[in-house]
């Protein structure tokens, strides 16, 4: 299933696998100035390719290696031989062999599936990707994954943020996510002059800095509460129940891959490492 919406020069493409007549677990790609930023999942690859036929395409940029952001890469490269795909160097081997390099839990196979292999080109902090008329700066923003990056257009204040920023007050975290790195990356983008935030899911934000700073404050306050209870001798599960409430639906669906426990552990592990 696919939905299109324009924000001036930016085309947002919302993508989700259709299950029982409805799109489930949407993710967003963006076309801007000849660049396709992320490519959704394998189940929506043909829909995305069809939607892009009228848009000039000079490159794909992947914000990170998760399967709901790289799923159409292989199809695009088959249809457009030589199309470059830019991404973090750590993402490149995952693109080349996703089934081996990034095994998926059952829920991820159902909702997003395994991407076809594709060939990536590594890009790093401070580099620029040239669109048809505009440069886009690469900003390294780890935490959600260790290979996460954002794309920033400085003259217009556009930030394509992948999965770095999600609105609301998180009560669960994915296994392997690093909360202190997420906080540091949010602080990094909060230093930029931002006019528009184009996230990998949820709504586009105009003048997003207040929301970003509020998210940082929430994460830091939550971390203080968790660390205080842990220092008082509380166990991880007790902390999760006390601060984050009862069991969540996402814990059932993901088999615990997303959980309150993971969120607590990420705070504790990061604090110990620091």
Image (cartoon, rainbow, N blue to C red):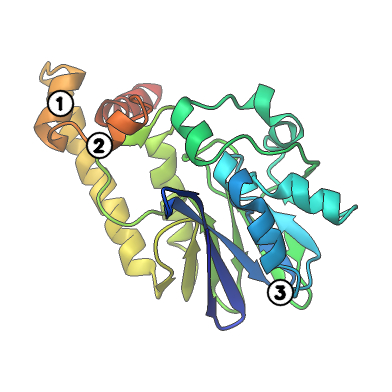
Q: Does dot 3 land on a helix, a strand or a loop? A: loop
Residue furthest to the right: 82
Residue placed under numbered mark 1 in the picture: 239
Q: From the viewer's side, name the closer residue of 117 and 168.
A: 117
Q: Earlier in the sequence, mark 1 or mark 2?
A: 1
**Picture residue at 84% right of the left edge, 49% below the top:** 78
Element class at badge 1: helix
Residue at x-position 60% and y-position 52%: 44
Question: Where is residue 252, by image quadrant?
Answer: top left
**Residue 148 falls in image quadrant:** top right
Q: Residue 84 location, x and y as percent?
A: 82, 53
Which residue matches tag 2? Answer: 249
Crowdedness near tag 2: few (<14), some (14–19) or many (≥20) residues, C-alpha within 10 Å: few
Mark 3 vs mark 1: in front: 3
Mark 3–mark 2 contact, CB under 8 Å? no
Residue 125 in the image: state x and y as whole percent.
66, 50
């Amino acid at each position: 299933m696919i939905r299109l919406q324009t924000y001036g020069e930016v085309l947002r493409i919302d993508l989700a696998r259709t299950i029982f007549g409805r799109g489930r677990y949407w993710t967003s790609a963006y076309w801007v100035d000849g660049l396709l930023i992320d490519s959704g999942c394998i189940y929506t690859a043909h829909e995305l390719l069809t939607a892009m036929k009228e848009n000039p395409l000079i490159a794909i940029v992947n914000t990170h290696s998760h399967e709901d952001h790289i799923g159409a890469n292989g199809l695009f490269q088959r249809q457009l031989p030589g199309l470059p795909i830019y991404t973090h160097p750590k993402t490149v081997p995952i693109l080349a062999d996703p089934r081996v390099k990034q095994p998926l839990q059952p829920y991820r196979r159902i909702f997003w599936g395994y991407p076809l292999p594709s060939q990536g080109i590594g890009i790093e902090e401070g580099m620029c990707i040239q669109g048809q008329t505009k440069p886009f700066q690469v900003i390294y923003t780890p935490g959600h994954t260790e290979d996460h990056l954002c794309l920033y257009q400085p003259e217009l204040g556009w930030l394509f943020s992948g999965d770095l920023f999600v609105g609301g007050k998180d009560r669960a975290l994915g296994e392997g996510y690093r909360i202190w790195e997420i906080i540091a990356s949010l602080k990094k983008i909060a230093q930029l002059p931002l006019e528009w935030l184009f996230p990998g899911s949820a709504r586009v934000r105009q003048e997003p800095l207040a929301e970003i700073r509020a998210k940082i404050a929430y994460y830091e306050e939550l971390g203080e509460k968790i660390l205080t209870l842990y220092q008082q001798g509380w166990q991880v599960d007790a902390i999760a129940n006390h601060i984050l409430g009862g069991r969540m639906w996402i814990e059932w669906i993901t088999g615990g891959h997303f959980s309150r426990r993971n969120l607590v552990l990420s705070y504790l592990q990061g604090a110990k490492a620091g």
